[in-house]
Amino acid sequence: MSAWRLPPETSADAVLLVSELVTNAVCHTLSVRILCGIGLIADDCLRVEVHDHGRAAGGLPRCEPGPEDEGGRGLLLVQEIAHTWGVDRSPLTGGNAVWATLMVSDRERGTCVDEEMPGAAAPRRAS
């Protein structure tokens, strides 16, 4: 990300997104291998992906953590930090491809274009 000269806060958000998505894949799937990808899909839009062997039909399960719970907030963080995010069937693993886009923070906020990383679905907002 430093080679792309991304602002430090964008890089920190990307690291947090990957961490949360990988943690979910490790904790909630029986994956023997998890693949991560990151790329600029436009000058002002960064995309991260995590591919696992899970099979979350209809999307990822939602969690309503209580105030004393130590976990269950990963996707809530993803939803708050990401510009868009979602889950699709992974053509690489046959499981889930969970992805998120970030707008580069020191540039004017716009929309991420519909370009994509190889094998991934076009960006859309998860519900």
Image (cartoon, rainbow, N blue to C red):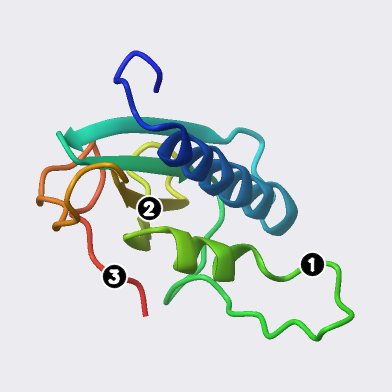
Please say whether residue 118 is visible from this viewpoint. Answer: no
Distance between mark 3 and mark 1 Cα atoms: 23 Å
Residue at 50%, 32% in the rendered image:
35
Q: Is residue 33 left or right of residue 108?
A: right
x, y percent for residue 27: 74, 54
Residue at horizontal 57%, vertical 64%?
77
Question: Which quarter of the rendered picture does the C terminus lie within?
Answer: bottom left
How far from the left and from the top, in percent, is residue 62? 58, 79
Cβ–Cβ below 8 Å for labels 2 and 1? no
Identify the disc placed on residue 125. 3
Q: Position of residue 4 (x, y in %)?
A: 29, 20
Numbered badge on residue 100: 2
Tell me the amino acid under the disc marked 1: Gly
Name the residue that disc number 1 marks: 71
Q: Secondary structure at mark 1?
A: loop
Q: Report helix, strand or loop for mark 2.
A: strand
Q: Amino acid under label 3?
A: Arg
State which tag comes first along the sequence, 2 or 1: 1
Disc 3 + disc 2, Cβ < 8 Å = no
Q: Visible in this render: residue 35?
A: yes
